[in-house]
Amino acid sequence: MSQYRESEGIISDIANQLIDMLTSIKLYALFFGIPFTISLALCSFYTVKSGSAGALSTFGKYNEEAILPGLHFKAPFIQTVDIVDTKMQAANYLGGKDLPDKKGVINKPMINVLDTKNLNIGVELTVMYTPKSNSVPKILSKYGKNYFDKLINPTIRDVVRDVIGKYQAEKIAQERAAIAKEIKYILTKKFENTEFILNEVSLRDIKLPKMVRKKIEEVQMAKQEEQRLEMIEKQAQKEQRIKTTQANTLKIEITTRAQAEAQKAKIQADAKAYTLKKEAEAKAKANEMIARSITNELIKYKSIERWNGDYPKFLMEGKTNSSIIQLPKMD
């Protein structure tokens, strides 16, 4: 009987301990469950900022639809979100060192290319590109977040090498505009089949070998000297044309003046001749009128009028008055 009572007491103690344990569990659940539930609810919501896009992954597989800026919901512990910057980004290829990158700007050394003669040429350029927001899940699936090193950088380097490699170093400086245009054209075509938009390509500089630069400078100096001599020759020709024009002008002025003086002299001579002619005509006409007015009676009258009382010493006879007779003196 006593053994039965002992067993019953042990069972009662165990039951009390179980009741106390369950009570503690309820208290712990109440104390820790509410914050956990709140945290779980908060983890279910996330925000995508402007200039970004996200890709929602369910059990490690990305959904095809991109998550655009705004407030969104996800299943905790089941889904995760990866955010990608979709603002315009720049890739600078400058200098000989790999400089630290900045937000949205990737700095790389200039691209070294071999020309047709295997001479080393350095190309400095900047490429501006933008990830397509709707293609973020595809970008992460194909390349991950390191898409620049896996796609953008190799594409740019391949295009630059293909274009520059077709030219000789000596002609690259002259063909710079054509090279820049061709690089941009080919890169644009390459980007059309990707999840990125090519915004701009700027060819900054082309670093030529020292021997090539020296040769180009010599050619340029020779051209400048040739242009200088050509300008001197043109100036001399211009001055000669000016002198010839001045001489011709002076000759024309002298000729014109001489012609004017000759014309003036001719006009004066013609005027004088005309005057003399008119004077002669007037005198002739006057003499003719005088001759018509003289008659024998007028002559006799004038003779008598002018007679002083002396007899003439000579007398002319005959029809032509050819005979002269001396008259005797009258005492």
Image (spheres, rainbow, N blue to C red):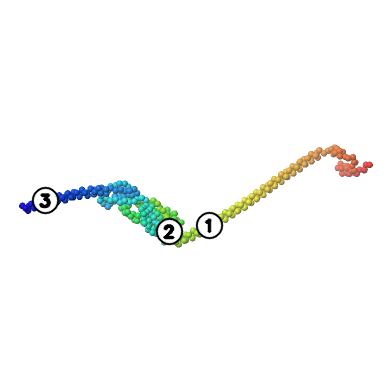
Residue drawn 32% across the image and 54% down it: 145
Inspect the image, locate mark 2, and give the three-letter code of the amino acid beneath it. Lys
Please state the horizontal and vertical placement of residue 240, each as a whole percent of the image.
Answer: 59, 54
First reached walking from the N terminus: tag 1 or tag 2: 2
Please state the horizontal and vertical placement of residue 6, each as a whole percent of the image.
Answer: 8, 53
Q: CA distance from mark 2 to mark 3?
A: 94 Å
Farthest left residue in view: 1
Total marks drawn? 3
Inspect the image, locate mark 3, and give the three-letter code of the amino acid beneath it. Ser
Q: Which residue is mark 2?
A: 207
Please state the horizontal and vertical placement of residue 199, each as a whole percent of the image.
Answer: 39, 51
Q: Specify whether 96 is left or right of 82.
A: right
Q: Quadrant of the C terminus?
A: top right
Q: Which residue is mark 1?
A: 228
Residue drawn 66% across the image and 49% down it: 257
Front-most of residues 2 and 234: 2
Q: Specify whether 69 is left or right of 259.
A: left
Q: CA distance from mark 1 to mark 2?
A: 29 Å
* Crowd rating for badge 3 (residues with CA inside 10 Å; few <14, some 14–19, many 20+): few
Marker disc for residue 12: 3
